[in-house]
Image: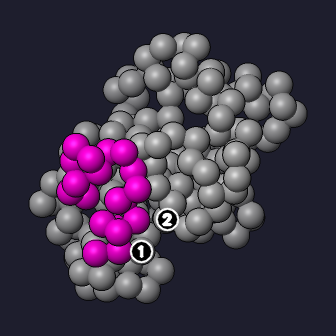
């Protein structure tokens, strides 16, 4: 697997080789979850930011930790629970962006996800792009370009998922925060 390969086809690079966004990293099947965790670790990912809510999907954390231990790898996992099709608070988005900035500054390779990798994930990507200096409209346009390689694009070509999520991104840059 090269540095720019994606361990899951339902993902896309936000910062090539450093920050990948996409769908739920695990699976409802334990063996498939183990295979996915191995693929992420073997591709060099060591930081996982989970945007799902507790109990929304089966946790992959214990399998991820076991696979990391088998490889003598240290990993970082953090959950920022956002309800499906929902929005984070301004404080939570600020914390998510800080976690991404810290991980990249520490030269860690980050994967972050929600369930489908479209709504909550797209909202974070859009705000991250605005945080990096794009205005809200340009951030949404760039998000659409980045999202195109994801297999999710074939059946859901809109990102983020809801008008409210897109508005959150637009407002994030205009005011330095959303809301």
Q: Residue at x 46, y 23 (%)?
A: 27
**Residue 67, x across and y down, in percent:** 73, 26
Q: Which residue is mark 2?
A: 14
Q: Secondary structure at mark 2?
A: strand
Q: Residue at x 12, y 60 (%)?
A: 163
Category of crowding for the residue at label 2, using alpha-carbon neighbours closer than 10 angstroms: few (below 14), some (14–19), many (at least 20):
some
In the current view of this chain or complex, which residue is farthest to the top?
Answer: 30
The foreground one among 23 and 146 is 146
**Residue 38 in which image quadrant:** top right
The foreground one among 128 and 102 is 128
Q: Residue at x 47, y 80 (%)?
A: 132
**Residue 173 in which image quadrant:** bottom left
Q: Which residues are magenta?
A: 141-159
Q: Are marks 1 and 2 in contact (CB under 8 Å)?
A: yes
Query: Is any atom of residue 1 visible in this view?
Result: yes
Taking 111 as reference, is 146 above or below it?
below
The tag on residue 70 is none
**Residue 172, x across and y down, in percent:** 29, 75
Q: Which residue is mark 1?
A: 129
State the separation of the CA atoms marked 1 and 2. 9 Å
């Amino acid at each position: 697997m090269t540095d720019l390969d994606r361990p899951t086809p339902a993902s896309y690079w936000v910062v090539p080789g450093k920050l990948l966004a996409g769908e739920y990293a695990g699976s409802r099947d334990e063996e498939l979850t183990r295979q996915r965790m191995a693929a992420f670790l073997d591709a060099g990912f060591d930081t996982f930011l989970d945007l799902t809510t507790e109990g929304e999907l089966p946790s992959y954390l214990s399998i991820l930790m076991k696979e990391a231990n088998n490889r003598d790898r240290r990993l970082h996992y953090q959950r920022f629970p956002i309800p499906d099709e929902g929005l984070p608070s301004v404080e939570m988005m600020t914390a998510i962006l800080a976690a991404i900035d810290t991980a990249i500054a520490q030269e860690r390779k980050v994967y972050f996800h929600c369930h489908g990798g479209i709504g909550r994930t797209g909202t974070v990507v859009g705000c991250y792009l605005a945080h990096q200096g794009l205005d809200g409209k340009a951030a949404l346009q760039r998000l659409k370009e980045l999202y195109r390689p994801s297999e999710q694009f074939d059946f859901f070509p809109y990102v983020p998922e809801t008008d409210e999520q897109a508005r959150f991104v637009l407002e994030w840059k205009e005011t330095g925060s959303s809301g």
